[in-house]
Image (cartoon, rainbow, N blue to C red):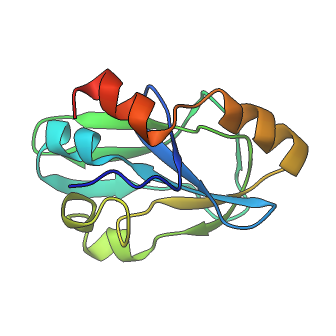
Amino acid sequence: MSMPEDRNYSAEHIWAKQQGDSVVRIGITDYAQRALGDVIAVTLPDIGTGVQAEIACADVESTKSVSDIVAPVSGTVVARNAGLEDSPETINSDPYGQGWLLDIEVDPAKAAAELAVLQDASAYARSTGD
């Protein structure tokens, strides 16, 4: 699967894509979903929940393990992918599209600094060997 160039990537295998000035959508990378195996459940925070960069904000359960989702940015959850409750396997089939996890409303000034420390697609691909 090709890695989208329009987002940033964390060392924890989370992608972050800006959706305008004040919202960042996050999800797990293809590399992460392959390492997890078959995803069987997802626990996402409620809308209105505050999240902090570098702190776990959700989890993904697979047939192998439960993995924390570490937020790449700080802000407030403004949307969650409720479709994953009934179809968590969407993360395996479409991690960069329909398998997204959360939309986080951010302070644009803070988000720019938080996103700047993440990797671009080519650096992330080098770090994972993809």
Q: Is 21 left or right of 120, judged from the image as shown?
A: right
Question: What residue appears at the point 17 percent right and 36 percent down from the top-left corner?
Answer: 35
Give coordinates of residue 96: x percent, y percent.
37, 61
Give the quarter of the image for residue 55.
top right
- Asked if residue 52 shows in the view, the reply is no
Give the quarter of the figure containing the C terminus. top left
Report x, y in % for residue 30: 26, 48
Quadrant for the N terminus in the image: bottom left
Q: Is residue 101 left or right of residue 92?
A: right
99 lies left or right of 72:
left
Q: In this view of the protein, which residue sits in the foreground, 47 or 54? A: 54
Q: Residue at x 10, y 44 (%)?
A: 63
Instruction: Name the residue nearer the viewer: 118 or 45.
Output: 118
Which image quadrant for residue 113? top right
Q: Quadrant of residue 19?
A: bottom right
Q: Residue 119 in the image: x percent, y percent?
A: 52, 31
Residue at the location (85% across, 50% down)? 108
User: Quick check: 93 above or below 111?
Assistant: below
In the image, is residue 113 above or below residue 22?
A: above
User: Which sits in the foreground, 15 or 44?
Assistant: 15
Q: Is residue 21 left or right of residue 66?
A: right
